[in-house]
Image (tube, grey):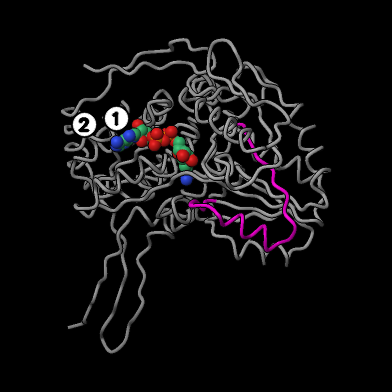
């Protein structure tokens, strides 16, 4: 049987070896998930909500253990692992509170003995192939509403967050989800690929653009519903009227939190020329105070780079920016020693010929570019194949609205960044993906609407 070895990216140490799924075990799990789905769908929504409430309580009571596992396998600073788990709770509350409204049948016409109703049915068997950077968020954004809507779920966590995946499934099973209704698949791309060969009714993916498009191509001829939550190259613009210190402090966090490994990390900053130097001064002062080191230490802000190959991407972006004339203010290199580490890196004097300003970095590295007006900022913000989030810092709300209404992005921010709300849809333009999670729409997406035409005899 194939094995999956889990290493701590902060130290390189082997944490655990798991038995990986095979083509045969994936097929068996898919079959039993299908057999179990209709009985699950016939349970009451109140029963399913009660199970999610028990799951929530278990997350609270095991929070320290769950945070330690997350930090060990992805290298996330422990305070940020706790933040992710605490941040999960309002999402679960939202799903529980909105599930009824999201799927309630409703009458849209009733005249002359003819009634028309819309009712939601579960999709059936939902597959979730997930990423490692926020495994509790991206996993539960799919698993929890899919279960609430009466689907069975085949969940393949990232091979870099498999222990967290085990915890999620264990806690949901203990809370009352039947074993065959939610099944865990352990392994890397080959197990994800085996999952695509099964009879599934929806594929919900979070990960890179390259993998997402491959999955969409594989499933296209079978007309399976596909949702893809992919990468970003998220811009933020600091207008001349913004406070440079406040904006710099907010944007350092937006760029470097989770060691820059967030789909909605700030990856490009445009600053009006009149406040550029002041902004950069505050930005560098904030970055220099960030503590990089043992992710288990309370004050650590910059953790490890989870995937070793990403170090080469970051090094290549640095080399390309330097070769094209950018100014490096700090960082720019790996930290020596065991594990995968990259120093917080800040460039100015950048432009859009540089990879740093065009391709997702997914690390603690940022380019700051001078602009002379709103038009130039909007043009540069839209000069990307991605469109996940975008922000603007200004005292002028109408100017912010004018800029943000012209920016191609699924989520837009005024005087904030790197923020996700369970109440709002999470989606992207262009290569950032198709479909959405969160909001009531992100619950309903795990159902199919059925049209009822009802004539009284
Ligand atoms: P990835 O594409 O390398 O892997 C994602 C998942 O796909 C993993 O579970 C992996 O095992 C699986 N996989 C790999 N090859 C496969 C194949 N051929 N068939 C089926 N499954 C396969 O991405 P990652 O490194 O886990 O995640 C990082 C990316 O995810 C970044 O681009 C980030 O921006 C993006 N992301 C997006 C969001 C969002 O909400 N838009 C959230 C988190 C992460």
Residue toward you, 410 or 70: 410
The magenta stretch spans which residues? 364-388
Q: Is mark 2 within 8 Å of ligand 1?
A: no
Task: Give residue 408's quadrant in the image.
Answer: bottom right
- In the image, what residue occupies the spot 61% across and 33% down? 323
Residue 270 position within the rendered picture, expressed as x and y whole percent measured from the top left: 69, 50
Does the magenta segment cover residue 369?
A: yes
Q: Is residue 209 above or below residue 372?
A: above
Residue 396 position within the rendered picture, expressed as x and y whole percent measured from the top left: 77, 63
- Looking at the image, residue 275 sits to the left or right of residue 448; the answer is right
Residue 185 tag number = 1
Label 1 Cα neighbours within 10 Å, binned few <14 / some 14-19 / many ≥20: many
Quadrant housing the C terminus: bottom left
Quadrant housing the N terminus: top left
- Looking at the image, residue 142 sits to the left or right of residue 376; the answer is left
* Residue 105 in sight from this viewpoint: yes
Provide the secondary structure element on which disc 2 rests: helix
Which residue lies under the disc numbered 2? Answer: 26
- Looking at the image, residue 125 sits to the left or right of residue 48; the answer is left
Provide the secondary structure element on which disc 1 rests: loop
């Amino acid at each position: 049987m194939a094995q999956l070895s889990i290493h701590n990216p902060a130290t390189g140490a082997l944490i655990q070896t798991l038995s990986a799924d095979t083509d045969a075990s994936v097929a068996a799990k898919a079959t039993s998930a299908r057999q179990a789905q209709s009985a699950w769908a016939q349970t009451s929504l109140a029963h399913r909500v009660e199970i999610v409430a028990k799951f929530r309580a278990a997350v609270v009571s095991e929070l320290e253990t769950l945070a330690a596992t997350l930090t060990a396998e992805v290298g996330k600073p422990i305070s940020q692992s706790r933040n992710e788990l605490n941040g999960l709770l309002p999402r679960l509350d939202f799903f529980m509170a909105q599930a009824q409204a999201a799927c309630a049948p409703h009458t849209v016409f009733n005249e002359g003995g003819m009634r028309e109703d819309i009712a939601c049915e579960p999709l059936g068997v939902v597959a979730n192939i997930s990423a490692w950077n926020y495994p509790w968020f991206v996993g539960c954004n799919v698993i929890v509403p899919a279960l609430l809507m009466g689907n069975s779920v085949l969940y393949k966590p990232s091979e870099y967050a498999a222990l967290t995946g085990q915890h999620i499934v264990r806690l949901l099973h203990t809370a009352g989800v039947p074993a065959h209704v939610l099944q865990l698949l352990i392994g890397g791309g080959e197990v994800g690929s085996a999952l695509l060969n099964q009879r599934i009714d929806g594929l919900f993916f979070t990960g890179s653009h390259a993998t997402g498009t491959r999955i969409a191509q594989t499933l296209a001829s079978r007309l399976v519903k596909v949702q893809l939550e992919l990468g970003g190259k998220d811009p933020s613009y600091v207008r001349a009227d913004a406070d440079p210190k406040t904006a710099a402090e907010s944007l350092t966090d937006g760029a470097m939190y989770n060691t820059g490994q967030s789909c909605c990390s700030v990856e490009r900053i445009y600053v009006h020329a009149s406040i550029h130097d002041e902004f950069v001064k505050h930005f560098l002062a904030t970055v220099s105070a960030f503590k990089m080191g043992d992710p288990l230490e309370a004050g650590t802000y910059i953790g490890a780079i989870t995937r070793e190959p990403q170090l080469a991407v970051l090094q290549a972006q640095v080399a390309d920016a330097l070769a094209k004339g950018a100014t490096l203010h700090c960082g720019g290199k790996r930290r020596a020693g065991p594990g995968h580490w990259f120093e917080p890196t800040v460039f100015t004097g950048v432009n859009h010929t540089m990879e740093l300003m065009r391709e997702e970095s997914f690390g603690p590295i940022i380019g700051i570019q001078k602009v002379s007006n709103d038009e130039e900022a909007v043009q540069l913000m839209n000069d990307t194949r991605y469109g996940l989030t975008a922000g603007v810092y200004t005292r002028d709300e109408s100017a912010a609205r004018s800029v943000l209404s012209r920016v191609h992005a699924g989520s837009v921010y005024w005087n904030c960044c790197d923020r996700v709300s369970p109440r709002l849809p999470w989606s992207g333009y262009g290569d950032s993906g198709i479909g959405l999670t969160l909001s009531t729409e992100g619950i309903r997406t795990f159902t199919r609407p059925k049209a009822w035409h009802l004539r009284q005899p």
